[in-house]
């Protein structure tokens, strides 16, 4: 596992489209593994560019921007939404199987887990397709997920080969 260093990029962005009304935006907070499992469910199959995540050790923060698939509407129409995920109280961040220099590389997020070590500290692990991971050593779990803009239509729904006939 390699040590993750801060990107040094300005994380501010400007929206080219108006934000949806607050009742359409998903906003979630996690303070324990059960809460994080809810966030993980909503972020399953989100796509993330390597250049769209950053660890800021001076602020003990890790954040990413993802294009999440909206599983709640897939019986009506298929869509994705730009969403942010942040972790506070991050003591260390490490990656496995991710080339941090390949900022345009796209990763598919499968799950986000938390394993408690010595309460309330623990490790959050972001698991990506192909075995890539981001491991965050946390003083305690404090994560937030929030939709950042309007949803857009997509032509395909994520699918996984589970090896079943």
Image (spheres, rainbow, N blue to C red):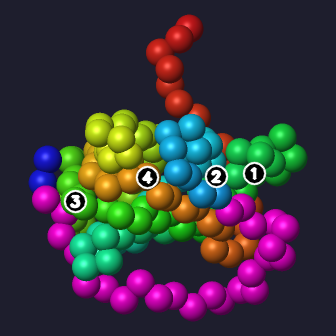
Residue found at x 87% / y 47%: 76
| Kind of element beneath mark 3 | strand
Q: Quadrant of residue 27?
A: bottom right
- What residue would you read off at disc 2? 69
Residue found at x 60% / y 57%: 29
Q: Nearer the viewer, residue 146 or 77?
A: 146
Do the numbered discs 2 and 3 sit on residues whose CB atoms are within 8 Å?
no
Mark 1 and mark 3: Cα distance apart in space = 36 Å
Residue found at x 53% / y 51%: 31
Do the numbered discs 2 and 4 sit on residues whose CB atoms are within 8 Å?
no
The reply to whether residue 29 is in sight is: yes
Determine the residue located farthest toward the top in the rendered image. Answer: 165
Mark 2 and mark 1: Cα distance apart in space = 8 Å
| Kind of element beneath mark 2 | strand
Q: State the predominant SS element of the stretch in magenta.
A: loop
Q: Indicate which disc, 2 or 3, sits on the residue closer to the N terminus.
A: 2
Mark 2 and mark 3: Cα distance apart in space = 29 Å
Q: Indicate which disc, 2 or 1, sits on the residue closer to the N terminus.
A: 2
Do the numbered discs 3 and 4 sit on residues whose CB atoms are within 8 Å?
no
| Foreground: disc 4 or disc 1 | 4
Please say if 115 is above or below 53.
above
- What residue would you read off at disc 1? 78
Residue found at x 58% / y 44%: 35
Q: Which residues are magenta?
A: 3-27
- What residue would you read off at disc 4? 141
Q: Residues within 10 Å of mark 2 (few under 14, many from 20)?
A: many
Percent position of residue 83, x then y: 59, 66
Q: Indicate which disc, 1 or 3, sits on the residue closer to the N terminus.
A: 1
- What residue would you read off at disc 3? 92
């Amino acid at each position: 596992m390699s040590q993750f260093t801060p990107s040094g990029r300005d994380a501010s962005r400007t929206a080219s489209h108006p934000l949806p009304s607050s009742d359409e935006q998903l906003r979630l907070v996690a303070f324990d593994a059960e809460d994080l499992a809810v966030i993980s469910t909503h972020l399953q199959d989100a796509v993330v560019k390597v250049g769209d995540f950053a660890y800021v050790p001076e602020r003990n923060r890790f954040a990413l921007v993802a294009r999440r698939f909206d599983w709640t509407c897939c019986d009506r129409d298929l869509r994705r939404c730009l969403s942010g995920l942040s972790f506070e109280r991050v003591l260390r961040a490490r990656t496995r199987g991710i080339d941090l220099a390949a900022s345009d590389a796209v990763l598919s997020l499968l799950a986000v887990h938390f394993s408690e070590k010595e309460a309330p500290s623990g490790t959050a692990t972001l698991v990506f397709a192909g075995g890539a991971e981001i491991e965050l050593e946390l003083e305690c779990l404090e994560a937030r997920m929030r939709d950042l803009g309007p949803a857009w239509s997509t032509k395909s729904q994520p699918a996984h080969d589970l090896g079943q006939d």
